[in-house]
Image (cartoon, rainbow, N blue to C red):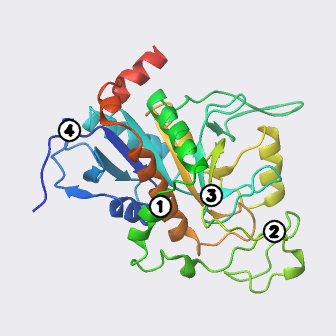
Amino acid sequence: MSRRLHREDYTVGWVCALPVELAAAQEMLDEEHETPQTDAHDTNIYTCGRVGEHNVVIACLPEGQTGTNSAAAVAVQMKSAFTSTRFGLMVGIGGGVPSEEADIRLGDVVVSRPYKAHGGVVQYDSGKATPSGFERTGSLNTPPTVLLNAVANLRAKHIRGKYKLLEYFSKLESLPGFGREAAGSDALFEAKYNHEGGATCSKCNKDYLVTREPRRQEVVVHYGTIASGNQVIRDAVERDKVSAELGGVLCFEMEAAGLMNNFPCLVIRGICDYADSHKNKRWQAYAAGTAAGCAKEVLSVIPPTDVANSRTAEEAIREISG
């Protein structure tokens, strides 16, 4: 029989955008709890449980309502209902930006971290038109210190070859579609070559495939800037242009910019496509799973006392905006 805790017992918020991401998140729970009663005006549906030593509350964006505004609305309601939450994790899929600097492949994971002028996430479609081009305006908050410390700790573990991500991901392999074999081949085409017909790349000219060295490691975690906005990027030339303008980003997604200034959080994205015209959904479940496994690994390195000693999300936002 599942336990019912009080809303004040939950210290970590986990937000996802798609049902496949929610399923992966729910499978990462070591224990599922009965959801405590929330305010009648709260439209979120919550899943509550425990991941390691942390009590976690999970919410998903409404069906068909992706984007920064929807993410902000879900996060604000979660923070209001679960007032003891210290920080959030935005976990799901994204479009990767492969480059000479970052050998990003499908199924890899990107974790936001401050880099150059950005705090980890940059809203690439927020700004104004000027005579010299599009000028991006506004800034987004960096993740709280407790999460940045966790990222540093996790990177050190990975350098030492101590990965837990695939161990956690293995919980999903019994679910239809989440296994690596269901995702198919990982094909990266030259940026200027556009997709030719159909839901898959079976008709695309293989002469335009980018040759890449085989890699022993199934999943690599990358750390850097994530570009967030309300437009889906489906053009590799545009992808590379925007990335260059922003000093090099690792992936594109559509929700994180709505969270950063409303709910102190870390963004974790599994790469399901290359943000190009060849985009399809075959890798979504696998990528959602690797991102969820990484989120669980992040939580595994955070001592509960560090969370308990942190300010609540509401206090942190109030201090930053204050």
Which of the two labelled residues, at mark 4 and mark 2, occupies the earlier sequence position? 4
Residue indicated by mark 3: 220
Q: Position of residue 53 (x, y in %)?
A: 28, 45
Give whichever of 262, 24 is nearer the camera: 24
From the image, state whether disc 3 or disc 4 is nearer to you: 3
Q: Please give the label number shown on residue 212.
A: 2
- Position of residue 74 measured from the top left corner of the image (x, y, whole percent): 39, 44
Q: How far apart are the alpha carbons under marks 2 and 1? A: 35 Å
Q: Secondary structure at mark 2?
A: loop
Q: CA distance from mark 3 to mark 1?
A: 30 Å
**N-terminal of the two: label 3 or label 4?**
4
Q: Quadrant of the N terminus?
A: bottom left
What is the CA distance from the residue labelled 4 to the residue labelled 1?
31 Å
Lower position in the chain sequence, tag 4 or tag 1: 4
Q: Which residue is mark 1?
A: 64
N-term mark: 3 or 1: 1
Amino acid type at image mark 4: Asp
Q: Are marks 4 and 1 in contact (CB under 8 Å)?
A: no
What is the secondary structure assignment of the residue under circle 1? Answer: loop
